[in-house]
Amino acid sequence: MLTKVISDFGSGRVRATTVAISDPGPLERYLSAKEPGSAFLRRGEGFVGLGEVARFETDYIDTADVWWTEIATQIDHDSELPGASGIGPLAVGSFAFDPDRSAFRSVLTIPRTIIGRRGGQYWLTQIGEHRNQTLPAPGDAPRFPEHLDLGHGTVTQDEWAGIVARCVELIRQGDIHKVVLARDLIAKADGPIDLRAVLGRLIERYPMTWTYLVDGMVGATPELLVRVADGLVTSRVLAGTISVDPDHTDPLAKAAQLARSTKDIREHEFAVESVAQALEPFCRAMNVPEAPSVLPLPNVLHLATDITGVADADVSALRLAAALHPSAAVCGTPTHLALDTIAAIENMDRGRYAGPVGWVDTEGDGEWAIALRGGYSGPDAPDQIRLFAGAGIVADSQPGAELEETRAKFVPMLQALGLD
C-alpha cells in the first residue's frame, strides 16, 4: 500500500529555477522550525531543503523510484549554472530498513527551496511559480530543552547481550554467516526536541561523515551506500569496528589490532561481497580493492572498502539503492536468513534506522547513505528521541565485546544531545 500527498504537482508542468548565489555560510542555519526542512551535508558541502512541494509515502524503494522518475519529467528547470550532479530540483528520502515488517513508512519529499554548496559553487533552487530568487533569511536559532533523561530502549543491556549469545548459537549451526543486531535507547526531554540543534552539533563534531536530517531522522553516518555522478558509481563499505579513546589508547595500535582481527576481517569480507554482487548487474566495469583500509573517526575505527564502477545508461541512484539494500553491513548474510533472524530475535522495529537516506536529482544522479549513528523523533512524541546502534555478529563474536561496540556507536548522538 502507498500514499501520495502532492501539493504543487498536478496534471500540468512545474517550473524550477536555479540561480548562482554568493557563499551563504553554514547551510544548516537556514533551517527553520516553522516549516519542514531537510539536510544532507559533508565537510560543509551538500544542501538544505526548505518546505515541501510534494511528498510520497510508500513501502518500497522501487515504487519511490518510479514515482520520482515520473515527477521529474514534469519539471521545467531553468538554471544559471552548468549542468552538474545535484544542482537543481531534488527528491530527498528516508527508507525503512525492513518494509515488510515495519510500522514505519518510507518517505520521499521534494523541497520547495534548496540552498546548496559544492566544489566552489553556491546555488539557490526554487520550485513553483513567482518564486523570489533571493536567498531566504536564516531560520530562528535552534534551542535545546533544559532537561533530558536517558533510559534504556526496547531491551536492557543484559537482555541484548543474551540476544547476541543466542544469535551466535544460530550462526554456529551453519546456515547463517553473519547477522547485524541493533538496539535502541530513548531520551526524553521536558519539551520538544529541536532536531536542528542535534544536526548542528553533529556537523561540528563529525564533519567527515554524511550528516542528515530527513523527516524526523537525524544522524552522522560514515557509510555511503551508493553515489552516482555522471555515470560513475561509488559505494563505501564499512564493517569491522573497534572503539577508540584517544586520551587513553594509541590509535595506531588500535588500527593495527583491527587490521589483524580475523573476526572483523571476515565480517568485512561478507559486506564487500554483498555490495559487489548487487552492483555488478548495473555496471559495465567495477573495481573492488583486494584489502580494506582503516577509516578513523573520533570514537571508532572501521575497516573500509570503496567500490567503484561505471553505471549502465539510465540507472538511477535510487534504483541502485534499492538493489543494494540491505547489504551485509547492516543486515547480514545470506540476506533473507539474516532478515528473518533479526525479525525473530531483535525484538524491536528499527523503522528507518539502517535504511537508505539521501537524495536523487532529475537525471538520476544522487547520494544515498545508510542511516546510522542517528535517531528518530516523530510528531507523535516530539519530546523524545529514539537512538540506535548495531554490531555485526559472526560465529566467534563475544556478547560483551559487541555490547561495547554499540556503546561506542551511540557516542555521536549522546554527544549531540549533551548526554555523554
Image (cartoon, rainbow, N blue to C red):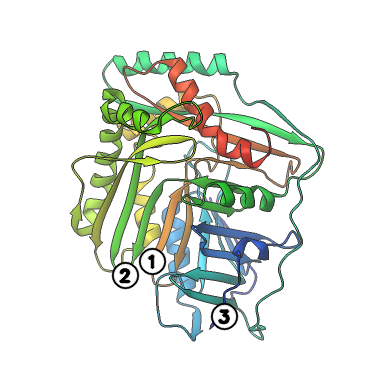
Q: What is the spatial separation of the Cα atoms under label 3 and label 2, in whole angstroms?
A: 24 Å
As drawn, the label of residue 230 is 2
57 versus 21 height, above or below: above
Q: Amino acid at mark 1?
A: Asp
195 versus 102 height, above or below: below
253 versus 298 height, above or below: above
Q: Nearer the viewer, mark 3 or mark 1?
A: 3
- Crowding around mark 3 (Cα neighbors within 10 Å: few <14, some 14 to 19, many 20+) is some
Which residue carries the number 3 mark? 21
Q: Amino acid at mark 3?
A: Ile
Mark closer to the chain start, 3 or 2:
3
Which residue carries the number 1 mark? 365
Q: Is residue 147 left or right of residue 93?
A: right
Question: Considering the numbered disc 1 on the image, is that residue within a helix, a strand or a loop?
Answer: loop
- Judge whether residue 183 can be spotted in this image: yes
Q: What is the spatial separation of the Cα atoms under label 3 and label 1, in whole angstroms?
A: 22 Å
